[in-house]
């Protein structure tokens, strides 16, 4: 098809899609469609097809907002909106792109080709966008009219350093449920800034630097109708790979400052910058950024899907809806359907994907192209940062069946599934988290009173402690997040700016790994803008988090495991799979408070923080592993069934050294101190104090209990009160990981904050505890340094 | 031992077998099948890095009653009544000026299997264990570990009532002659002058050289000793 060449360059005050649509309308369609082969369709030549390049100096948008409905405690719904005010697009600086066809002006370039193979018509779209810096002066949650608003979160900015790439190729139409699409989305080296102004007009920034989401995918994108066989696909935007041959790749991105060096394909590098004035820069030599934490993921994933839709989350019994019934500021609950916190409008998402184990798995013949195995990275943030890269992501079970003669390894892939994620604007004093049966049935005796570690009341947690009105807030609720992956190979890494050879870790992957799987994680994350008494902008927040220890068959678990994977010669040199760590963790954390960026720290002030948990300290073999030696008459070189660890090993007590149960309830003031920008100083520190209040008022008793795995008898350190200061640090070095704990008992040295364990109880397997005595630590400082150096 | 055997084998290789090659460092490490981790652990209570007790101005134990550890047993009140009685004052065993450093310079952590054993059901069982290996050339350092005084103290008010000074914060005055004390410390000239009230103290300084391994494993119900 021959088209007019639309090569006009015009300046536009506002960027809008209508330009593209209007331009397409002027194309001369006088010629017959010619057959295009697949190769031709994938080769996009700007001379054929449609080419639009829109350039502009700046754009002012004013207000951007999103509205949804929220239930209130008076059983009516209201409309709330999240408003970005003062939105502008401006140039970031000098030339940014290596493509000489582009100038430093803001621009969007579109290339569009349409072709047909005779029966199907597909399109090929290539677009590059350079938007400079998008800035919003404030983010507030307001009522339906946008007039009555809460405090601002701060000001936001997104800064681009190179073009954003979006390519799309379809074989048959657009959003066709049964036609394959290839999509490239290159979000590279974006910087996100949250700026809060503290007292004295000092600006502090929390920055996500060099954000990458460099995504290439092959699959199906469509809008599901209400007859879809999968209920969560109904009336939803669905993206999925579906076929075994399809995949998504997160390819590494070249570092914008260091050519030839790369960052993860999905990269979140969190840093802090204090006293910034009005500048938006991560490269200021006078005020360098300080690292907090970096998370990264790269490689190929498959069996992936993403669902996005609007949802009516109400329930005729509002307490059974996702976040529960709305509560007034005086703690009166709603009772009918319109009092469901989430309201009749809200956003729903679900993302899941399987990880590939290694480069061989990622390049298998099924996919047809070479790929990289999935890797996950955890590192210090910013520059001069060491980290660890985890690979060989596998499920917990080493084998899925055991039989005599030796059985094959588990070929399933590790996966993650975010579960149901609900995003809503809410107005309520309390929100609900699903209850955990294990914690609700773990006994606790204090004096002669017997109860359990948690009760149902602990799962309805408070958003704020005001008594006059509820702030309008943004709530993200996660239900059933599963991360069923254990990393069995790790290596130390360092950030791209380090060039001295002596400081760079060796590149060899080592046979140890870290397993941090979690099962059935539920979370409520609530945020709203607020102002501190001294006038500083702060973020109000509430957090509820719970995990389930394990499922009934023992193949999904929440654990923190260290895995040693040296080769086992009796198992064809497959890794041995010893593990040690905290296993089957049932956990509940609830907290509310405010977060601020003052004084070169990220400060969390929490009037109430409750942490409750039950876990096992255990060590042994992962389920389905082959023992390292033959023994007796039951396990011989013929690979009898007795040579393998049972598949339900995590449901048994055979590996358990000790059970641990605890509940801590009090107020906490926590500072997360970012690292200094040097190799020795870039560590993550947590400084603060935890004031355990003891039972009374809003607080419950604190306890730590050690449980015998055989008969369930317990030594309980119950009814703990007192103020504990802590100064903890985690540092990843070139080949070691160092933990430092500094506990200061009763830091203010007052009589009523002495650290006391008021009841030391001994519990028989069933029945009440018997009191042994009590213990007090009047004060002092205990410093503990642990250095951990893996060896292969 | 392995190195000597290897050298002998290498000697043979050069004489008669041209195909045998010298093993590199990586090869030598690969021969040892135990992957694991080296841990070093230091715990320091109320001391600085030179093992000095932190009781100077501005330091954590400047107020000496706030560096104590105390224990009270159930049903131990001064008038022999039970815990919670209206007349009884709690008795505390108070360790005063506790301090100490314990430093494990290197512990090797590995996974290993125990020797197979016969369990309670008569079956031969294999069990995995955590193995901690110690090296006598890297002893465990123990520095100034202990307490200055041990005393039995009493609350000042019955049943922790209003105005109570608990036994663990006691700074009493009394005694006479050589045993006179004021504000919690002895005043008469002699060894005890300026030290906290109590009847015994403990101070350990040692290098503990351990050689060998400790295996830690879970004691499940079918193990003959559990």
Image (cartoon, coloured by chain):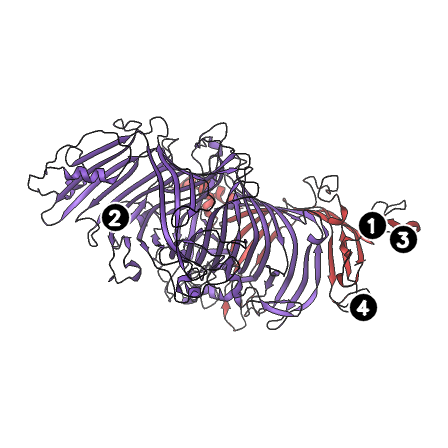
B28 or A64, which lies in front?
A64
The x and y percentages for residue A128 are 27, 36
Mark 4 and mark 3 on one chain: yes
Separation of marks 3 and 1 at Cα, in angstroms: 11 Å
Separation of marks 2 and 1 at Cα, in angstroms: 78 Å
* Labels in figure, total: 4
Quadrant of the drawing holding the N terminus of chain A: top left
The x and y percentages for residue A767 are 61, 73
Chain hosting mark 4: B
Please tell me whether mark 1 sits on a helix, a strand or a loop: loop
Separation of marks 4 and 2 at Cα, in angstroms: 80 Å
The answer to whether A159 is drawn above or below residue B43 in the figure is: above
Name the disc covering residue B184, or none: 1
Mark 2 and mark 3 on one chain: no
Figure chain in purple:
A
Please tell me whether mark 2 sits on a helix, a strand or a loop: strand
Figure chain in red:
B
């Amino acid at each position: 098809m021959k088209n007019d060449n639309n090569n006009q360059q015009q300046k536009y005050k506002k960027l809008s899609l209508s330009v593209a649509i209007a331009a397409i309308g002027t194309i001369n369609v006088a010629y017959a469609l010619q057959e295009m082969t697949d190769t031709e369709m994938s080769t996009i030549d700007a001379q054929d097809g449609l080419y639009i390049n829109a350039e502009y100096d700046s754009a002012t948008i004013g207000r951007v907002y999103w509205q949804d409905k929220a239930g209130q405690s008076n059983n009516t719904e209201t409309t709330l909106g999240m408003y970005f005010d003062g939105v502008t697009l401006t140039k970031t600086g000098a030339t940014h792109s290596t493509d000489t066809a582009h100038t430093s002006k803001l621009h969007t370039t579109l290339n569009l080709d349409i072709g047909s193979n005779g029966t199907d018509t597909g399109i090929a779209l290539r677009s590059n966008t350079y938007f400079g810096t998008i800035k919003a002066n404030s983010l507030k949650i307001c009522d339906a009219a946008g007039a009555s608003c809460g405090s601002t979160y701060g000001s936001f900015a997104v800064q681009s350093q190179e073009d954003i790439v979006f390519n799309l190729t379809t074989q048959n139409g657009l959003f066709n449920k049964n036609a394959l699409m290839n999509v490239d989305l290159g979000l590279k080296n974006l910087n996100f800034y949250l700026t809060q102004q503290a007292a004295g007009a000092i600006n502090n920034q929390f920055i996500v630097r060099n954000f990458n989401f460099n995504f290439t995918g092959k699959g199906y994108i469509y809008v599901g109708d209400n007859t879809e066989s999968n209920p969560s696909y109904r009336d939803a935007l669905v993206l999925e790979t579906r076929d075994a041959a399809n995949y998504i790749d997160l390819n590494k991105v070249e570092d914008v400052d260091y050519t030839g060096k790369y960052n993860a394909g999905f990269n979140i590098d969190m840093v802090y910058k204090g006293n910034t004035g009005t500048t938006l820069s991560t490269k200021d030599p006078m005020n360098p950024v300080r690292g907090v934490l970096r998370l990264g993921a790269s490689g190929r994933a498959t069996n992936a899907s993403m669902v996005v839709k609007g949802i009516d989350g109400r329930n005729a019994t509002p307490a059974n809806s996702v976040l529960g019934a709305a509560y007034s500021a005086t703690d009166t609950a709603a009772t009918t359907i319109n009092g469901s916190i989430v309201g009749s409008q809200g956003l729903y998402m679900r993302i899941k994907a399987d990880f590939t184990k290694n480069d061989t798995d990622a390049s298998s013949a099924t996919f047809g192209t070479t790929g990289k195995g999935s890797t996950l990275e955890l590192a210090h943030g910013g520059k001069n940062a060491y980290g660890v890269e985890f690979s060989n992501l596998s499920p917990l079970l080493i084998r899925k069946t055991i039989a005599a003669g030796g059985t094959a390894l588990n070929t399933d892939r590790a996966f993650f599934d975010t579960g149901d994620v609900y995003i809503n604007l809410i107005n309520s004093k309390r929100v609900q988290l699903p209850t955990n049966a294990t914690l609700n049935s773990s006994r606790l005796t204090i004096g002669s009173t017997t109860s359990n570690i948690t009760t149902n009341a602990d799962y309805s947690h408070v958003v704020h402690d005001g008594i006059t009105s509820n702030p309008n807030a943004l709530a993200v609720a996660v239900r059933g997040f599963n991360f069923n992956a254990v990393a069995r190979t790790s290596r130390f890494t360092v950030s791209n700016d380090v060039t001295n050879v002596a400081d760079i870790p060796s590149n060899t992957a080592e046979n140890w790994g870290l397993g941090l799987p979690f099962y059935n994680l539920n979370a409520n994350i609530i945020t709203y803008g607020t102002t501190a008494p001294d006038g500083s902008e702060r973020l109000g927040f509430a957090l509820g988090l719970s995990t389930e220890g394990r499922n009934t068959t023992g193949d999904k678990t929440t654990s923190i495991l260290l895995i040693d994977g040296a080769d086992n010669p009796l198992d064809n040199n497959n890794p041995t799979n010893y593990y040690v760590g905290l296993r089957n963790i049932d956990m509940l954390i609830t907290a509310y408070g405010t977060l601020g960026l003052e004084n070169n720290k990220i400060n969390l002030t929490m009037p109430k923080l409750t942490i409750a948990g039950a876990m096992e300290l255990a060590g042994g073999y992962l389920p389905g592993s082959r023992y390292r030696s033959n023994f007796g008459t039951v396990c011989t070189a013929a690979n009898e069934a007795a040579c393998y660890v049972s598949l339900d090993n995590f449901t048994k007590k055979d590996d358990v050294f000790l059970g641990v149960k605890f509940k801590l309830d009090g107020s906490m003031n926590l500072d997360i101190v970012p690292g200094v920008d040097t190799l020795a100083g870039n560590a993550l520190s947590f400084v603060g104090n935890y004031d355990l209040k003891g039972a009374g008022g809003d607080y419950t008793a604190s306890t730590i209990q050690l449980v015998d795995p055989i008969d369930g008898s317990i030594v309980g350190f119950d009814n703990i009160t007192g103020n504990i200061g802590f100064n903890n640090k985690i540092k990843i070095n070139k080949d070691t990981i160092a933990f430092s704990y500094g506990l200061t008992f009763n830091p203010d040295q007052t009589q009523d904050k002495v650290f006391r364990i008021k009841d030391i109880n001994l519990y028989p397997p069933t029945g009440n505890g018997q009191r042994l005595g009590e213990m007090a630590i009047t004060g002092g400082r205990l410093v503990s340094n642990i250095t951990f150096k893996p060896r292969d | 031992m392995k190195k000597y055997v290897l050298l002998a084998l290498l000697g043979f290789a050069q004489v008669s077998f041209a195909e045998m090659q010298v093993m590199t460092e990586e090869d030598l490490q690969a021969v040892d099948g135990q992957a694991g981790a080296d841990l070093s652990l230091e715990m320091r209570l109320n001391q600085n890095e030179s093992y000095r007790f932190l009781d100077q101005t501005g330091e954590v134990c400047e107020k000496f009653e706030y560096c104590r550890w105390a224990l009270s047993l159930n049903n131990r009140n001064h008038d022999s009544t039970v815990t919670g009685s209206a007349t009884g004052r709690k008795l505390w065993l108070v360790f005063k000026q506790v301090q100490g450093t314990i430093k494990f310079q290197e512990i090797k952590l590995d996974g290993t299997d125990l020797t197979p054993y016969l369990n309670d059901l008569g079956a031969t069982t294999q069990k995995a264990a955590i193995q901690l290996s110690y090296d006598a050339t890297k002893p465990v350092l123990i520095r100034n570990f202990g307490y200055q005084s041990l005393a039995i103290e009493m609350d000042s008010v019955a049943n922790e009532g209003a105005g109570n000074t608990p036994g663990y914060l006691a700074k009493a005055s009394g005694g006479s002659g050589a045993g006179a004390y004021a504000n919690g410390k002895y005043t008469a000239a002699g060894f005890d002058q300026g030290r906290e009230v109590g009847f015994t103290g403990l101070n350990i300084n040692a290098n503990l050289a351990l050689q060998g391994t400790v295996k830690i494993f879970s004691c499940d119900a079918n193990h003959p000793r559990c």
